[in-house]
Amino acid sequence: MYREIRQWQSSSLNKNMEIAVYGHYGPALLMFPTAAADYLEYERFQLIEAIAPFINEGKLKAFSINSINNESWMNKSMLPHHKGIRHQQFNDYVINEVVPFIHDHNKGLTPIVTTGASLGALHALNMFFRRPDIFAGTIAMSGDYNLQSYTKGHYDENVFFNSPEQYLPGVTDHEYLEQMRRGKIIIAAGQGNFENPDASRRLSGILHSKSIPHWLDVWGEDMPHDWPTWRLMLPYFLSTL
């Protein structure tokens, strides 16, 4: 498998940010790490190996980015307001730096599907719903789509506008909704230890109320909030795209 590590000084984040690229060509899979992990997490926990057939056959090209969760909601020493600002800077980094990098690396506009597990699922799904004009879909695994689950009581506009469970009910713009409806949306969860399938069910209910097509897939009680689950889920869902 072709593997490349790229990095640059992010103007949005004012720090060096790495990105791992897997594969020569194909539609892009943009991968968001879990919790406070980094751009090589999916490689370390064999998720890249699990989707290797898709990469090697040119069915996708994976881009695994770094997170700044330990500089925002996972950072216990920061003021909550500053955590929200950092989160928004991360969003700007993805849209203004990562997306152009992907198109440049693929030598042209290419469909981009976001994916992630746990907190990475929130980022992946949030990014799609914020910018359905840019992203072609999302595969969100074992996520909680209300950012207040991580903010320890803090609430402001940055929390609201990064919580799909909160902002989606208020969306009324027809073209914005139509862009969402054109995307491929997969929301998955297990029912095993430390999973929260009700978070996925709540989001699914909101999407139904907006007539946004999506696939909610809740797996069994033998599927915990852990890597063995996600190593099964991601290749399974990729095979349906």
Image (cartoon, rainbow, N blue to C red):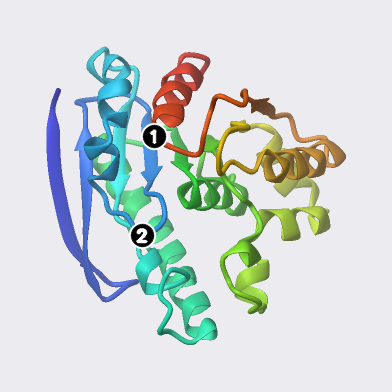
Q: Is residue 184 visible?
A: no
In the rendering, which numbered label is found on residue 36?
2
In the rendering, which numbered label is found on residue 227?
1
User: Seen in the image, is 191 located left or right of residue 76?
Assistant: right
Q: Residue furthest bottom?
A: 79
- In front: 66, or 8? 66
User: SS for tag 1?
Assistant: helix
Closer to the N terminus: mark 2 or mark 1? Answer: 2
Residue 60 horizontal/vertical position (percent): 34, 24
Q: Residue at x 66, y 40 (%)?
A: 179
User: SS for tag 2?
Assistant: loop
Q: Residue at x 74, y 60 (%)?
A: 166
User: Seen in the image, is 131 located left or right of residue 197?
Assistant: left
Alpha-carbon span between mark 2 and mark 1: 15 Å
Toward which corner of the image does residue 9 lie, by quadrant? bottom left
- In front: 189, or 237? 189
User: In this rendering, is residue 33 above or below 223?
Assistant: below
Number of other residues with Cα within 10 Å of mark 2, as a class: few under 14, some 14 to 19, many 20 or more: some
Q: Is residue 140 visible?
A: yes
Q: Residue at x 36, y 73 (%)?
A: 71
Residue 102 horizontal/vertical position (percent): 30, 43
User: Seen in the image, is 208 located left or right of residue 218?
Assistant: right
Instruction: Identify the amino acid type marked 2.
Output: Ala
